[in-house]
Amino acid sequence: MRISSHSVSRNTARRGIAHQASPALQNEVTLSALNNPFAEATESVNRHGLETCEKRVRTLSEHVGQAALNHRAVELEQFPKGLLPQGDTFAGQRVVIALDGGRTCMRLPKQGRKKKGQKYHKEILPFCDGTHEGREQFKLLLKMYLHKTGAALAKHITFIGDGALWIWNIVDEIIKELNIDPQKVTQVLDYYHACENFWKVIDALPKPTQKKKQRLLKKVKKTIPRTH
């Protein structure tokens, strides 16, 4: 029996193999490259016994990234046409959405025995995405994820932003367009930009020394609640 190279390529592609790398290897390399420069990512991968070079780390991580972008492009085309099924991952949950560089602390599952009456939160990995294609594409991307993940059906949604007016305008538009109950939505200035604005006020005070201003900022920061 003769097997052509084209048949082999199609079979390996169906199994998720690309550039002679298994899905597990692609995952390991990409996660390392996401968190480190390519040179450091290569060292990290090699320390785990997966001998590779910096060029291969770049090639594999860029392949995974492009595949993700291609998949997202299909979903963004399907969504406005009503062809993208609505998910339920976050339905009934409390969801935090950080926009334009906002950050939030993530609560991780605790280890050990659960105390009587204590409930642990189910671990759901965060969705992280972005675009350079302007306001309307950003809005479409956010709407698509709210639909795809079921976040539009969440028990409560907290939007965290940097205070830019265009961010809050988009949130208000999405609430109306996706028929989200406004009573289930909270909009919050993120912790880091809140601290930045407090410092601007404190630094403008004429009398305190810089050390006293720093102590005052430290005291004020303790009064700012963080979202968990």
Image (cartoon, helix red, strand yellow):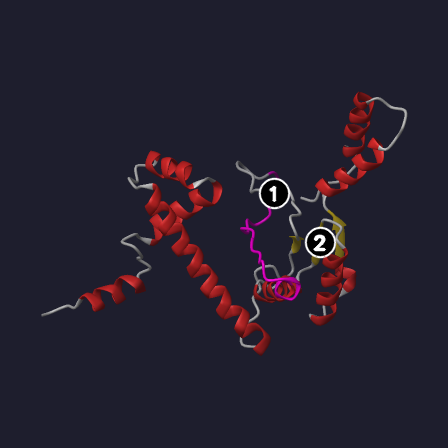
Residue 84 visible? The answer is no
The answer to whether residue 206 is above or below residue 77 is above
Image location of residue 206, percent across then percent down:
89, 28
**Mark 1 is on which residue type?**
Arg
Seen from the viewer's position, the closer of residues 169 and 156 is 169
Image location of residue 129, percent across then percent down:
56, 55
Q: Are marks 1 and 2 in contact (CB under 8 Å)?
A: no
Q: Residue furthest right?
A: 207
The answer to whether residue 37 is above or below residue 206 is below
Which residue is drawn at the image coordinates 76% and 50% (left, top)? 163
Which residue is drawn at the image coordinates 22% and 68% (left, top)? 6
Q: Residue furthest left?
A: 1
Image location of residue 54, percent across then percent down:
35, 42
Instruction: Say which residue label 2 marks.
Output: 158
Instruction: Say which residue label 1 marks.
Output: 107
- Mark 1 or mark 2, which is nearer to you? 2
Q: Of the residues under marks 1 and 2, which one precedes in the sequence?
A: 1
Which residue is drawn at the image coordinates 77% and 28% (left, top)? 218
**Mark 2 is on which residue type?**
Thr
Q: Is residue 68 left or right of residue 95?
A: left
Magenta segment: 115-138
Seen from the viewer's position, the closer of residues 102 and 56 is 56
Q: Residues within 10 Å of mark 2 (few under 14, many from 20)?
A: some
Determine which quarter of the picture holds residue 220. top right
Image location of residue 162, percent across then percent down:
72, 49
Residue 28 image label: none
Q: CA distance from mark 1 to mark 2?
A: 15 Å
